[in-house]
Image (spheres, rainbow, N blue to C red):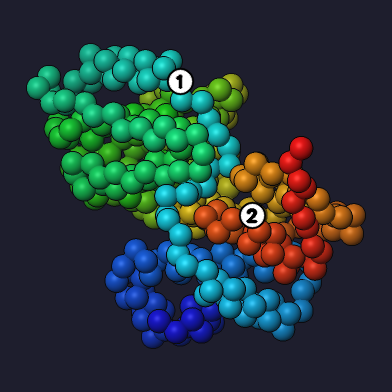
Amino acid sequence: MDDSIIYTYLSGKATEEEKARLRDWLNQSPKNRTYFFDLKAIRNAQRVTNKINAEGIEDSLARMNKRIDSIPHSSKRAILNIRLRRASIAALLFICVSLFCLYITHPRDVANPGNNLVTYTNEATGHSVKMIHLSDGTVVWLGSRTVLTAPSVFTGGKRVVCLSGEAFFDVTKDPSHPFVIQTNLHEVQVLGTSFGINTDEEAGICKTILMSGSVRIQDPSGNNLAVLTPGQQALYSQKTGNLEIEEVDVNALTSWRFGLISLSNVAVKEILRCLEETYQVKIQMNTASLENRRYNFSFKHSKGVEAALKQLFYITGISASIQPQR
């Protein structure tokens, strides 16, 4: 695939024929999709809300692509999860108790007594992702410190799983057997769709981000809260019982499963904080002239902090350095 077609698509100027060629290319392999999201991340990193000369952007892209081409592909197992969550024994006990109670109250929704439950975990404390396949063909990406429990084989009227942590679901469509994700905070029901869920049980907050299809969100009592459409994010607070819905950049917010870290409309200090937490380093940068600017910044975790700082230099014009550890 010619990169110029990808850039034309990302700029919103692609013809229908170019869009069709790009879709066919993306469907050929996961490697193609990963490469596409890499270029999208680089493109997004150049889009600062302040006015930037268009020729400067293209020049930066050219320099960045030249450097990227010289770097070998790294392992895809190093994945984003900026906010680390606790996944303790208490969380596992909660899932087991929840499944037991669910079986008592809705035995047809889970499985028959002879059907074993399987617990999938991604216990990594760093930036990691684990991809699993459920018995119905549904694909799930688990973020770090995440636990998912599901029947070994789905039976009954619903396909019910329990989640603690962050995951992205690509659900196999089966209208006669709705797919249900239960968390400690709320429940999400779908037929066949792609979406992400991030639960923070300590804060009592759950985010649901919809990429395609539709999902219905319910509170723990089974009351309907909202139905999402593609491009929307729902933020549910257990403390207040409120559900806030907003339009978001779904690709950016779910790109963690491809190893990308994406920040939208943030100050440079937030970017530096993210880099410091991600790579466990201290960064020195003179940000005084950038205080009133906001940036969209995306980078691939596996390429390292030095590459990320070079990318930051391209969009700010100010260099940053890593402070020596004492």
23 to the left or right of 137: right
Q: Quadrant of the N terminus?
A: bottom left
Q: Secondary structure at mark 1?
A: loop
The residue carrying mark 2 is 305
**Residue 153 location in percent, x, y?**
15, 35
Looking at the rendered structure, the number of numbered marks drawn on it comes to 2
Please report the residue visible at 65 percent of the width from the left and 41 percent of the height from the top. 280
**Residue 297 location in percent, x, y?**
65, 59
Please report the residue visible at 31 percent of the width from the left and 67 percent of the height from the top. 29
Q: Marks 1 and 2: in contact by CB < 8 Å?
A: no
Please report the residue visible at 23 percent of the width from the left and 29 percent of the height from the top. 118
**Amino acid type indicated by mark 1:** Ser
Q: Secondary structure at mark 2?
A: helix
Asked whether the viewer can see residue 102, the reply is yes
Which residue occupies the foreground of this view, 308 or 201?
A: 308
**Amino acid type indicated by mark 2:** Val
Query: Is 68 situated above or below 183?
Result: below
268 to the left or right of 6: right
The residue carrying mark 1 is 88
Of badges 2 and 1, the one in the foreground is 2
